[in-house]
């Protein structure tokens, strides 16, 4: 029995049980969730509707894609489903270990909430359970969004009995809990015993796992160009994927359980298969629960120790000097343009020192580059290659738009909080807005143009079309930067300090929607005339000289440039006007 | 009520707190002073259980912060320099969360929450979300939450930052009243005037060591006539600020009396 403290009202205090602690955290979660939802319904209906609509679209598209794929695989190689499931789920399992570990690192140790909870009379294992639920949700929703259309499509193609669909969610949840808990245990052990490695080590391990999986996929799929999709190719791929079929892995329990749940005996009965499926589910659930117990024990022993180890970390002191590029940019050009250049140098320096910004930039553009590098594996027809080239251009634009919305859009709002600095400098407000635009435009144009060039080269696209794609790419970079900076200046949120919260507000959502519409418009007005030109060529209408189809392509390109000018200067004009009048 | 016994805390090769022996009895208001990097924050973090000592032990109401943190935390209230609140909870909901965590009965929690809301004049915004609070409002709410369970020991890290003069007065009056009732207060501050006004004893920490420990009157008694190095017998007393600067200067001060 724990002694109670001095209090005039001593009877008011008592140590509470684990169950009560969990109940308090559940109530806390409910209060926060309902408050967030209420606020979202009041202030961010557009964003909420977009999220629901886009999720439904994404789910529907994936379902369609998987439906076609399973129909194809089912008719040709029915026995390979197990291999595909095992490869897919084992890859996800590795990703879930690291993603949950990284999320729990932040939740258990680095947030202000973690420090608050450590000063309250609450058990470490309850704190772990509370933060684990959050990390579990954040790391598994992607899996559910990706896995549910896939497995639903599989069930429909296989004419699975209804229990298959009823068991999908329990199977997925029980499966995700295993790697997620392992990630949590790994995180706590690393922080307690290797605090100096902490997030860097987790990130490096995550990156290594990602690279290993890409390498595995590469090994499995890479074959000489002519052999792609042949029977030999399939055989080779399946033989390589068979290493993921390990009976001791949760991915195998999940795959086997799902296949059993969808199966019927020759006489149409399902009882035997369902029983087998339930056995696999029981194995998953019991392992998940056992790991939860281990996780709680580990938390009880290591959580406070790890938190203390992290507090003991001395921030590394690094003397930072001006890079040659910053030096060059600061000094080159006229004295009149110097304030503008200095503002750009300042933003560039912040970008370089903010790992979250450039690492996301590098990962997304790196993965895109890897994909573009890989398109050479497949054979494409002339017009088909052009179409894929335009789709790739749209993908580059969409990725850039997520960056302009997430990182460029909040820049003006964040400057608003530093008005006491900028307001006292001999810099006019227009220069601040223009510096953001130039920073985004120049920063985006180099990687985007290189990626488009890579894609087109790998697709074997003709030089004139490459040039057209590059012009479109420049138009997209300018337009997306104009939209993000212009709307950011027109609708700044000067009170918010978190860039992600600024980006997820109304202005950020509007910027993302307009950016997406702009990308679609630019790609459509240029792609349609080009496809028509190829269609005319294939039907033998093409001739030498300047044809009607060529005029169509030129007209499309002109329309794209006009759209680009509008998207760049109209939001900037509105933004500049609003920013000049802004009273911080 | 608070006992540091041979406490040393090092960060790698750097020693932040060296062999700290300090006992603070029930009902005393103790102010820890010192320049930046002196080890005050490390001491506070060890006292509230965020950091473990490398050597020695820290006890609150007889409970070791490392061996039995839950029991020690039941006796502790803590006001950090950067208040942490749940942004999507109202002030009242936050107070209920804290009251529940301390196992307060519903009736007692209701009574104490209303009392603290009144004490810190939180009524006007107690039902607004914390995300709309100013720094001063946040600080007042954290003060209220730290006193809800009527702790034996209240730990304050730079408590007056962000508070307006009226709130400062409320806090000062409250600290005097609670210490009279037997609560022990451990406060880290840079404000000499506040230490002089409120503290029963002060400790001046320099490079991880207590250079001075005693009452403000003791501190004044250490005043020296510049140039002589001797006690200021019959001489014009130095200002408290000058005394503090002498003690915390690179070659000044000495061992605790």
Image: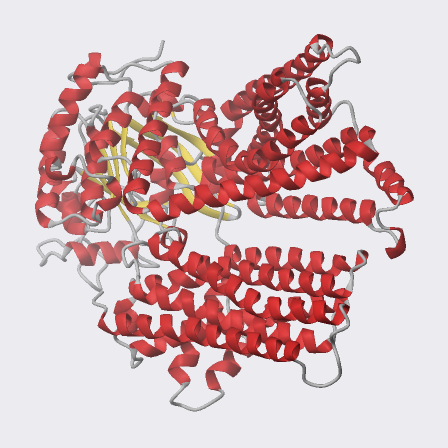
Q: Nearer the viewer, residue B110 or A512?
A: A512
Q: Is residue A281 left or right of residue A116?
A: right
Is A561 placed above or below A524 here?
A: below
Percent from the top left, x then y, of residue A317?
A: 50, 59
State the residue at coordinates (56%, 40%): A60
Residue A90 falls in image quadrant: top right
Q: Is residue A83 visible?
A: yes
Q: Quadrant of the N terminus of chain A?
A: top left
Q: Is residue A147 left or right of residue A239?
A: left
Q: Quadrant of the C terminus of chain A?
A: bottom left
As rendered, which of A509 and A388 lies closer to the eye? A388
Residue A131 image offset from top left, x and y in percent: 46, 31
- The residue at the point 14 percent across, 30 percent down is B116
Q: Looking at this rendering, what residue extends furthest in the bottom direction?
A: A334
Q: Using the image as rendered, state which of residue A568 and residue A126 is in the foreground.
A: A568
Residue A321 visible? no
Q: Residue furthest right?
A: A232
Residue A267 on image: x %, y %: 78, 10
Q: Position of residue A275 (x, y in %)?
A: 69, 9
Q: Nearer the viewer, residue B46 or B115?
A: B115
Q: Is residue A501 above or below residue A430?
A: above
Q: In the rendered view, would you say A237 is above or below B254?
A: above
- Tell me: B186 left or right of A199: left
Give the number of callouts. 0
Q: How is the image coloured?
A: secondary structure
Q: Residue at x 60, y 47 (%)?
A: A203
């Amino acid at each position: 029995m724990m002694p109670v403290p001095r209090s005039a009202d001593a009877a008011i205090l008592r140590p509470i049980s684990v169950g009560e602690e969990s109940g308090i955290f559940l109530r806390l979660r409910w209060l926060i969730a309902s408050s967030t939802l209420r606020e979202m319904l009041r202030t961010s209906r557009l964003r909420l509707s977009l999220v629901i609509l886009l999720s439904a679209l994404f789910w529907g598209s994936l379902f369609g894609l998987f439906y076609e794929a399973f129909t194809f695989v089912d008719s040709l190689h029915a026995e390979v489903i197990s291999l595909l499931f095992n490869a897919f789920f084992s890859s996800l399992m590795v990703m879930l270990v690291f993603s949950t570990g990284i999320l729990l690192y932040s939740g258990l140790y680095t947030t202000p909430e973690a420090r608050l909870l450590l000063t309250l009379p609450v058990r470490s294992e309850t704190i772990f359970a509370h933060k684990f639920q959050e990390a579990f949700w954040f790391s598994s929703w992607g899996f559910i969004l990706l896995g549910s259309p896939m497995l639903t499509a599989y069930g429909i193609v296989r004419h699975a009995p209804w229990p298959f669909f009823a068991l999908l969610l329990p199977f997925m949840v029980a499966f995700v809990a295993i790697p997620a808990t392992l990630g949590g245990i790994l995180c706590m052990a690393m922080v307690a015993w290797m605090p100096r490695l902490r997030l860097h080590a987790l990130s490096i391990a995550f990156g290594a796992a990602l690279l290993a999986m890409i390498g595995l996929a590469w090994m499995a799929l890479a074959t000489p160009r002519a052999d792609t999709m042949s029977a030999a190719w399939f055989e080779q791929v399946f033989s390589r994927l068979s290493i993921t079929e390990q009976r001791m892995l949760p991915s195998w329990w999940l795959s086997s359980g799902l296949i059993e749940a969808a199966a019927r005996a020759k006489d149409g009965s399902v009882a035997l298969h369902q029983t087998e499926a339930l056995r696999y589910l029981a194995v998953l659930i019991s392992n998940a629960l056992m790991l939860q117990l281990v996780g709680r024990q580990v938390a009880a022993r290591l959580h406070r120790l790890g938190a203390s180890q992290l507090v003991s970390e001395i921030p590394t002191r690094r003397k930072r000097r001006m890079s040659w590029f910053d030096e060059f940019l600061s000094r080159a050009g006229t004295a009149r343009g110097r304030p503008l250049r200095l503002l750009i140098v300042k933003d560039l320096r912040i970008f370089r020192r903010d790992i979250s910004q450039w690492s996301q930039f590098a990962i997304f553009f790196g993965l895109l580059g890897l994909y573009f590098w890989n398109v050479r594996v497949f054979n494409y027809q002339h017009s088909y290659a052009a179409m894929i080239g335009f789709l790739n251009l749209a993908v580059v634009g969409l990725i850039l738009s997520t960056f302009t919305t997430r990182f460029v859009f909040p820049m003006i709002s964040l400057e608003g909080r530093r008005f006491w600095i900028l307001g006292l400098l001999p810099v006019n407000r227009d220069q601040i807005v223009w510096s953001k635009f130039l920073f985004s435009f120049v920063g985006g144009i180099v990687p985007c143009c290189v990626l488009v060039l890579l894609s087109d080269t790998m697709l074997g696209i003709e030089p004139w079309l490459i040039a057209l794609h590059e012009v479109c790419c420049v138009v997209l970079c300018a337009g997306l930067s104009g939209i993000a900076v212009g709307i950011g200046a027109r609708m700044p949120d000067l009170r918010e300090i978190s860039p992600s919260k600024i980006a997820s507000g109304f202005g950020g959502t509007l910027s993302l929607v307009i950016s997406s519409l702009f990308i679609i418009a630019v790609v459509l007005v240029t792609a349609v005339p080009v496809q028509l030109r190829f269609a005319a060529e294939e039907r033998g209408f093409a001739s030498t000289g300047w044809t009607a189809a060529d005029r169509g392509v030129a007209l499309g390109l002109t329309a794209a440039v006009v759209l680009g000018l509008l998207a760049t200067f109209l939001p900037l004009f509105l933004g500049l006007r609003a920013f000049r009048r802004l009273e911080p | 009520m608070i006992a540091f016994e041979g406490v040393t805390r090092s960060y790698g090769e750097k020693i932040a707190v060296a062999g700290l022996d300090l006992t603070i009895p029930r009902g005393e208001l103790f102010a820890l002073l010192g320049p930046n990097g002196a080890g005050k924050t490390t001491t506070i973090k060890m006292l509230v259980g965020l950091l473990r000592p490398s050597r020695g032990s820290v006890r609150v109401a007889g409970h070791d912060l490392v061996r039995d943190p839950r029991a020690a935390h039941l006796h502790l209230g803590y006001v950090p320099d950067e208040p942490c609140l749940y942004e999507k909870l109202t002030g009242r909901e936050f107070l209920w969360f804290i009251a529940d965590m301390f196992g307060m009965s519903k009736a007692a929690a209701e009574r104490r929450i209303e009392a603290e809301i009144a004490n810190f004049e939180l009524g006007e915004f107690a039902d607004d979300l914390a995300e709309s609070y100013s720094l001063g409002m946040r600080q007042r709410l954290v003060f209220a939450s730290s006193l809800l369970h009527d702790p034996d020991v209240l730990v304050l890290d730079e408590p007056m930052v962000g508070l307006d003069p009226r709130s400062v007065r409320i806090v000062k009056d409250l600290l005097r009243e609670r210490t009279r009732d037997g609560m022990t207060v451990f406060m880290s501050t840079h404000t000499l005037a506040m230490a002089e006004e409120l503290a029963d004893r002060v400790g001046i920490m320099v490079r991880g060591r207590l250079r001075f420990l005693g009452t403000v009157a003791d501190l004044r008694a250490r005043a020296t006539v510049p140039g002589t190095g001797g006690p200021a017998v019959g001489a014009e007393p130095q200002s408290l600020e000058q005394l503090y600067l002498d003690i915390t200067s690179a070659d000044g001060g000495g061992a605790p009396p």
